[in-house]
Image (spheres, helix red, strand yellow):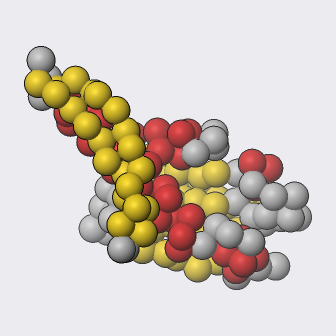
Amino acid sequence: MSKYEELATVLTEERYLVEALEQLGYNPEVHRAGAPLYGYLGDERPEKAQVIVRRQQLNSASNDIGFARDAQGQFRAVVSDYDRGIGFDQGWVGRVAQAYKECQTMAVAKSRGYVFQGRSLLDTPQGKKVQLRFSVR
């Protein structure tokens, strides 16, 4: 049985988290009051989360991955040792956060009347950076 660890995020808005996970190819479940996570053997774990990617969407030996809201309103990624070891680590959480930020930026820009012009990936000294371009109507 893998031990779960919580990874800090800056994610606070459920709708953008769900949209980001969907963009990354997952079908997340949303449970307002939280629901238990399940291990790779189908065993119910004591860990609970409000947004869950079920293990069947990950790897045949994976555990569920959850995003649990803390007392300050931020989501924490709840990921097992095994799943962190196969790539669902801080880097993966960073990709979720990047997709989240893009979803959030697109929604805010649309609400302010901006028109999406395109997305590009730039190489920077810190690594790849996404650039979204907008114009005024």
Total marks in image: 0
Residue at the spot x=74%, y=72% of the render? Answer: 86
For the residue pair 132 and 16, the one nearer the viewer reads as 132
Q: Is residue 23 above or below residue 37?
A: above
Residue at the spot x=63%, y=61% of the render? Answer: 65
Residue 80 visible from this viewpoint: no
Q: Is residue 76 above or below residue 3?
A: above
Q: Position of residue 124 (x, y in %)?
A: 35, 66
Residue 111 appears left or right of 35: left
Residue 105 visible from this viewpoint: yes
The C terminus - image quarter: top left
For the residue pair 133 and 90, the one nearer the viewer reads as 133
For the residue pair 46 and 50, the one nearer the viewer reads as 50
The N terminus - image quarter: bottom right
Q: Quadrant of residue 123?
A: bottom left
Residue 93 appears left or right of 73: right
Q: Position of residue 9 (x, y in %)?
A: 39, 68
Q: Quadrant of residue 83?
A: bottom right
